[in-house]
Image (spheres, coloured by chain):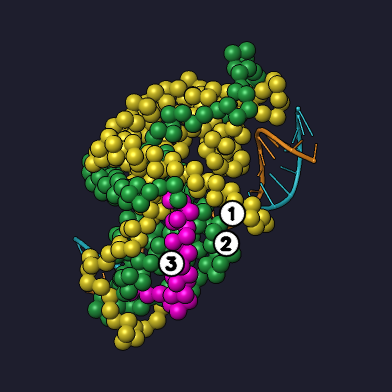
Chain colours: A green, B yellow, C orange, D cyan
Amino acid sequence: MTDTPVPAEHDDALPQGEAEIGELGRQTGYLLRRASMTYTTHWMLSTRATSIAGLTPVQAGMLILIEENPGLTQIELARLLNVEGSTLWALVAKLREMGLVQRYRQPGDRRAFALHLTKQGKRALVQTTALLADHQEALLQRLTPDQRAQLNQSLKLIIAAGEVENQRLAEMAPQ
Amino acid sequence: MTDTPVPAEHDDALPQGEAEIGELGRQTGYLLRRASMTYTTHWMLSTRATSIAGLTPVQAGMLILIEENPGLTQIELARLLNVEGSTLWALVAKLREMGLVQRYRQPGDRRAFALHLTKQGKRALVQTTALLADHQEALLQRLTPDQRAQLNQSLKLIIAAGEVENQRLAEMAPQ
DNA sequence: TATTGTTATACTCTATAACTATA
DNA sequence: TATAGTTATAGAGTATAACAATA
């Protein structure tokens, strides 16, 4: 990992600003990562001066899911989000720390907890949904309604196919 | 952040498996994140038994960019990837540790380093490009060629619009 | 002064493995 | 035994802030 003096054949840096994305810009996986990061950055910036400043896209999504499925358990939420239990636990712990989510022990199954939004969580969700439309519009402004629908559809097809493939691969060589 | 005994109105967990993604599944930002994560997982699983096991999508992308723009500087690479200098520095340091990338001091500008792939880096890139097509195909299997082209186009439009918006927002209230 | 790179530090999101409590 | 949740730990990828070296 040392740097080397410059051999003649390497005295060839590109002139400023001439480097290009090239092939990588044709890779859907790369474009997805880039678009997703752009979305995250835009959300954080556009909510910066509001009452939900600092609430991440993942956290906002969890508030939406908990409101739509009040009382769901942590394991069910993990399945919905396609993450491991320990990951979900950490995410929920953070939302509890923030005072947005409350858990209630299940009388029917004393292992499980039912998740609910607190009053403050509900207020955060109201702000979230109020800001979501403008956020979407800013990012999708150059797409027609038809393109937007097509995009969502294609993304769902990728997710569905990918999760089947990933399941298969994970089982193929378990260690 | 304490748990509470169950008040009557909260004794209402959903029956197993009845929770739904609902509104969140209509949010492009959420679908992008999910699709991107699926891509990453698929890449890691499908390269697991190859010579590039452990090479992440971000690292693979960097190899592609360095090969296409030999001698580019770290700052140029950071611009291409739209990340901060310190982020790029850490990514390059890791690739150097792995023996895939080598830096050469620029004679013209002694502040800068020209980035190049090592022999091992070139071998890793060959494997990467060899495996990329199957990886793409597995994830895009349910999309027609036209849908794939439309998808890439839409993602580029989102990235372009988003980066303009993000720039504007970042300048709007600098602190 | 401006640019390139570096360091220190911190945070989000993610995972695996080993564990406890309950079913 | 199986499931729900927890803890310890690790790692990728990202950022901000302060700094050194060079232009």
* Pointer 1 residue: B169
* Pointer 3 residue: A129
* Pointer 2 residue: A48
**Where is residue A131 shown, x and y percent of the image?**
48, 64
**Where is residue B64 shown, x and y percent of the image?**
46, 28
- Tag 1 and tag 2 share a subunit: no
* Total numbered badges shown on the rendered structure: 3
Q: Residue at x 45, y 22 (%)?
A: B122
Q: Nearer the viewer, mark 2 or mark 3?
A: 3
Q: Quick check: can you spot residue A73?
A: yes
Q: Magenta part mainly helix, strand or loop?
A: helix
Span of residues in magenta:
A113-140
Indicate the secondary structure of the residue bearing disc 2: loop
Q: Quick check: can you spot residue A159?
A: no
The quadrant in which residue B125 appears is top left
Amino acid type, mark 2? Arg
**Where is residue B120 shown, x and y percent of the image?**
46, 23
- Tag 1 and tag 3 share a subunit: no
Residue B159 position (above or below residue B19): above
